[in-house]
Structures are given as C-alpha cells and as structure tokens.
Image (spheres, helix red, strand yellow):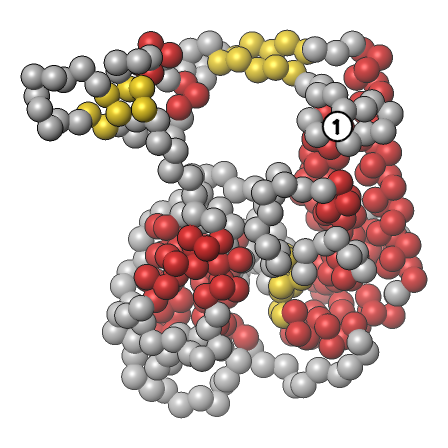
Amino acid sequence: VEMDGFEQNSGVIIIAATNRPDVLDPALLRPGRFDRQVVVDRPDVKGREGIFAVHTKNIPLDQDVKLEVLAKGTPGLSGADIANLVNEAALLAARQNCKVVSMQHFEEAKDKVMMGMERKSLIITDREKRVTAYHEAGHVLVSKHLPDADPVHKVTIIPRGRALGVTTYLPIDEKHTYSKEYLEAMITYALGGRAAERLIFNQLTTGAGNDIERATELARKMVCEWGMSEKLGPLAYGAKEEELFLGREITRSRNFSESTAVAIDLEVRKIITVAMKRSEKILRDDIETLHRLSNALLDREILDSEEIDKLIRGEDLPPPVDKRKNGDPEKPPTQLIKSAQPPTEQPVDGGKTKKAV
C-alpha cells in the first residue's frame, strides 16, 4: 500500500506491508491515505522455476535435476521456502560426500521442508506398517484408475511429521479453476486408503482421519460454494462471517433454513458415499495390483512414479536401493559441496498449507 499527502516532502513515499489486510481499519485505506494496494502473491509454477534457477546457479547439479518438476511439486512455497529447500538439498549432498546435488537430494529436502523431519525414533509394529502400506497403495491405485486425477509422483511409508505415510501428486499444469470431475476424482482417491483398509483387513483405523476431513471439506464446498449439486442447484449456502475488530470477534449469520441444512448434509453424504463405493470397486477389481504395490512398499519404503507404473504393468523391479542415500551406496566419496550453508528457519507458507481449492 502507498500513502499520499506529503507534498512538502518531495520524493518521499510511505509504504507499508501486511499479510492481514482483512483486519485493517477501512479509514486507513481511504483515498489520500494508503489508497494504492499492490498484491504480492506467492509465485506460480513459472515463478518457482525461476526462483529455483536463481538459487541453484552456484550449485553443481546432477544431469537428472529437473527444475520444472521441482517447481510443479512445490505449490504454495515462497521464495524464502525455495531457498531453504535448495540449501537443505546442498547440505544433504555435502553430508554424503557427493560432488553434485542430484534430484534425489532435492526430493529428500522437499519432503523435509513440506512434511517435516523423518521420525526415525518412532517404533511401528509390523502390522501397523502393513496397514500403512496398503493404505498408501490404495491411494495410488485408485488415482491411477481415474483419468481426471493428478499423476502420482511418489509414495512412501516413512513416517514424517504426524503422518505414517504420504502419497504425493504432481499436477500436469497449475490449475486455477477446478472441474466437477476433477474434484470428484480428488475425493475418490482421498478415500482410497480407507477403502483398502476395509477391503484387506476388514477394519477401519484412525489413519484415514485427514483423508476424510479433506474429502468432506471438498464435498461441502462443491455443494455450498460452487453450486455443483443437482438437487440444490447453482446457489451459494453458508454462514457469513464478519470480523468486528482485528479478527478477535466474529459474528456469524446463516442464510438458509433448517430444511436446507438437512438437504446440504444429504448431498455432501451422497458425494462421499458415491466416491467411497467407486474407490472400493476399483480396488476390488484390481486386488492383485494392490498386493504388489503394498508388498513393494514394505520392501522399499519409497516408490517413485516409474516404479509404480512398472508394478501396475506387472513388471518386476530391480533390486532395491536406499534412495535416501541417493540410490548409489557404492559411490566413492568425492569433493564436498562448499556452497552449502546452515538452513534458515522459515515457515513453509505462513503456517497454513492446503493442497488445492
């Protein structure tokens, strides 16, 4: 924002910055004061690729490093976050006495920055590990059968942060609008882990809690915000929230009746139920592939997109290597990377990360 009214101080411009414009007093933003607002959003995929190029120009990179792939896999990261990620990758390569930074170093650094440190001290029973493997394999297999889903980039059962396993996706293009089919696909593969647990173990665990939360949130937005319910039509329903003073007090007013609230709940439940049945059918019809994926996860702990495609085609995988050691345990020590610096403490995205929507 820019402030006017300083004619006697020629050449002086008052500039202020905030990440909470919603709590500013409107009197501060009226004409003659801070009346010109410039929105500096987080970088898009092209911007992130350019930032990666800037921060890696003085770092020796392996031939397998693809900045475009890194940019697509880091939505929501700021410039400082990307700088921290590059620095973490360089430090990881230096610790392993590698002469160049490889794509695997960047993948490991990305997991650390976006999902948290690997919890090596966490003790997991063999049964819990097996449940986690089938859970993540369920996500992978369901998404592979959905033409509208994003491609799977990697799946792991290595505990990070609060998760026992993670499946990551790599969108072909950075989307700004979402079709109904795409949202239904997201809900369906989000429920693939729960469907696999029920199909294989005939039980439900708390591991699907975050998946159910995300699926329900998407389904409710489809009904209440985006008018994607055939029964309720193209109308917006929801509680209107107004902040009275600096976000400390909030008033809520609902703009629909109790009968409409019941109809909304029924529509949300219908979307979730249909998606759940769809994911269960996919897994039931391709149960052998589900077993292959989960067994490979138990054996290797990490599967990339190429290995996943081979398993789905029924092909055998080469002997496993530790990808956390760059997949080349026989590589002799070489010159340390001198450009690595201690990582900076930066939040990933201000403390709030959402995949989409």
Dot 1 amino acid type? Gly
Q: Residue at x 43, y 59 (%)?
A: 49
| 177 to 223, vertically: above or below | below
User: Dividing the image into 4 quarters, which one contains the N terminus?
Assistant: top left
> Quick check: 12 left or right of 194?
left
Q: Is residue 131 visible?
A: no
| 51 to 180, vertically: above or below | below
Q: Residue at x 28, y 60 (%)?
A: 342
Q: For label 1, count other residues whose C-alpha is less than 10 Å away and answer few (under 14), some (14-19) or many (20+).
A: some
| 341 to 203, vertically: above or below | below
Residue 98 falls in which quadrant of the image?
Answer: bottom left
Q: Position of residue 47 (x, y in %)?
A: 42, 53
Q: Residue at x 83, y 44 (%)?
A: 275
Q: Nearer the viewer, residue 321 or 57?
A: 57
Q: Position of residue 121 (x, y in %)?
A: 53, 60
Q: Which residue is mark 1?
A: 227
Q: Nearer the viewer, residue 312 or 298?
A: 312
SS category of the residue bearing label 1? loop
Instruction: Report the number of discs.
Output: 1
Residue 289 falls in which quadrant of the image?
Answer: bottom right
Q: Nearer the viewer, residue 94 or 118?
A: 94
> Quick check: 164 left or right of 220?
left
Q: Position of residue 5 (x, y in %)?
A: 18, 15
Q: Position of residue 22 (x, y in %)?
A: 43, 21
Q: Nearer the viewer, residue 151 or 282?
A: 151
User: Dividing the image into 4 quarters, which one contains the C terminus?
Assistant: top right
Q: Is residue 29 visible?
A: yes
> Quick check: 172 left or right of 45?
right
